[in-house]
């Protein structure tokens, strides 16, 4: 049985630092600036022998109805409703503030077990603040330093007291058996949604989930963390990563935006399929092309989603025009799926999810060796490699070394002399022959060992 703990408190008391400490990874963005966390983020925490789900939340703060601050608090309230217990965090060095006292009442009204955490208690600097916290009526404060890992033993005892006892007759099992017996086709597909700011990434994910899981706003830059959510779409499991918008590097000045961009790049590297979302009214701009090139260089399957299609005038040839533009501007991923969608109305969402699954299948494809070498011989005969410095290049045979993305090795003479243009010819021919549209294809040249090299050495 899973146990869920929500970390709550006012902004900048160290909730995200504590979250990262409990999950054992730097998943949540951390900065001295208050209000970094906006969406709620879940992770699997482990403290000693305790395993539980932990939710990082936005700082409890008040704002006018409908404002971004108010909607951040709604996200926090949703996390509290989903939790079995609360971890109320305050800054022991700063002591209690009126905001702490106000939201301590909020935590009591939730009618759930509360663990009071006095963070930043390293040394004896937080003693006065910890003593002050008894006035909240939430029990004994647990002094910790989330940044330095101090006080985790006391936190363990406090969590152990509010968690149910583990079943004594639980049957032991080996995780390896589960992994070996698991059908790869049923594992969740990891999908990152990326694009320029305000392209509608969070709105699309909310439509897929049929709930306001992620904060959305007309203003650009609402999303900061890369938030992962689970999705079951017509019997297929997905793990979707919402990411911060990527602007041109020259425009990124604030430290927080740099952290958000780094988090987005990690999400791309962790993903298997990346959906590049563009605004239908400003598509295939320079930054879109840069992001697509990044996805190709990282070797991820690419799907292009042109969002806000409901705002475009209806006419014939719209989708065909998108296809032509994609092949023209992105020849390195020729044939990548292009889907027109509307995250607001849901138009084209079925086609997008189908395109993701198709791109994933292509990304995992393996080509039979016999068929590969028949193609290779025909491709070389139809267009032999050019002579370099008056000497003929000889390409012997090819083999696929791995999938994810499809990667091949071509054995040849003088690998360093084969022109890039000839490699592009082989890549495009591979795409066409084995139906690998849009997938990044890797070709490595390797020189065959010369069987007569030892005789030359002996003569010299």
Image: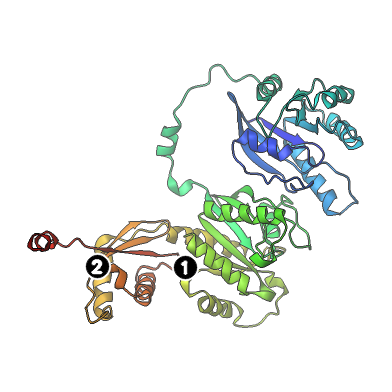
Q: Is residue 22 above or below residue 407?
A: above
Between residue 11 and residue 327, name the one nearer to us.
11
Report the disc number at residue 384: none
Mark 1 → mark 2, Cα distance in angstroms? 26 Å
User: Is label 1 or label 2 in front?
Assistant: 2
Q: Quadrant of residue 76?
A: top right
Q: Which residue is mark 2?
A: 412
Residue 286, position as x, y percentages in the image = 61, 74
Residue at screen point 72% across, 49% down: 213
Q: Quadrant of residue 450?
A: bottom left
Q: Secondary structure at mark 1?
A: loop
Residue 43, position as x, y percentages in the image = 63, 39
Q: Residues within 10 Å of mark 2 (few under 14, many from 20)?
A: some
Mark nearer the N terminus (1 vs 2)? 2
Q: Is residue 325 above or below residue 47?
A: below
Report the disc number at residue 438: 1
- The quadrant of the rendering that contains the C terminus is bottom left
Q: Secondary structure at mark 2?
A: strand
């Amino acid at each position: 049985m899973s146990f869920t703990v929500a970390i709550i408190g006012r902004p900048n008391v160290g909730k995200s630092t504590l979250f990262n400490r409990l999950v054992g990874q730097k998943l949540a963005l951390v900065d001295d600036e208050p209000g970094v966390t906006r969406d709620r983020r879940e992770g699997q925490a482990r403290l000693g022998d305790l395993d539980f789900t932990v939710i990082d939340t936005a700082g409890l703060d008040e704002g006018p109805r409908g404002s971004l601050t108010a909607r951040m608090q709604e996200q926090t309230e949703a996390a509290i409703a989903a939790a079995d217990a609360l971890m109320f965090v305050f800054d022991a060095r700063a002591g209690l503030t009126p905001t702490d006292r106000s939201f301590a009442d909020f935590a009591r009204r939730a009618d759930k077990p509360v663990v009071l955490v006095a963070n930043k208690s390293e040394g004896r600097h937080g003693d006065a603040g910890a003593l002050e916290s008894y006035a909240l009526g939430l029990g004994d404060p647990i002094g910790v330093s989330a940044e330095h890992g101090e006080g985790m033993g006391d936190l363990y005892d406090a969590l152990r007291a509010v968690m149910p006892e583990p079943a004594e007759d639980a049957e032991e099992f080996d995780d390896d058996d589960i992994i070996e017996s698991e059908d790869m086709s049923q594992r969740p597909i990891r999908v990152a949604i990326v694009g320029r700011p305000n392209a509608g990434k969070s709105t699309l994910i909310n439509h897929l989930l049929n709930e306001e899981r992620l904060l959305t706003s007309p203003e650009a830059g609402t999303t900061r963390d890369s938030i992962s959510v689970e999705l079951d779409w017509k019997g297929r499991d997905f793990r979707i990563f919402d990411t911060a918008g990527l602007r041109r590097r020259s425009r990124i000045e604030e430290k927080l935006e740099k952290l958000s961009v780094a988090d987005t790049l990690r999400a791309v590297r962790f993903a298997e399929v990346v959906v590049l979302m563009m605004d239908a009214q400003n598509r295939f701009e320079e930054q879109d092309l840069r992001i697509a090139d990044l996805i190709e260089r990282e070797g991820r399957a690419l799907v292009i989603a042109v969002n806000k299609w409901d705002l475009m005038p209806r006419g014939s040839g719209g989708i065909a025009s998108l296809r032509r533009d994609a092949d023209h501007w992105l020849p390195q991923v020729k044939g990548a799926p292009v889907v027109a969608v509307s995250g607001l109305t849901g138009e084209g969402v079925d086609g997008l999810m189908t395109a993701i699954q198709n791109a994933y299948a292509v990304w995992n494809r393996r080509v039979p060796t016999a068929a590969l070498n028949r193609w290779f011989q025909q491709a070389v005969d139809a267009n032999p490699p050019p002579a370099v410095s008056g000497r003929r290049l000889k390409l012997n045979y090819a083999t696929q070394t791995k999938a994810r993305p499809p990667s091949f090795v071509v054995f040849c003479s003088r690998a360093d002399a084969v022109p890039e243009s000839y490699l592009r010819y082989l890549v495009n021919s591979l795409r066409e022959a084995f139906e690998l549209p849009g997938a990044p294809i890797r070709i490595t040249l390797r020189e065959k060992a010369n069987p007569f090299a030892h005789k030359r050495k002996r003569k010299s």
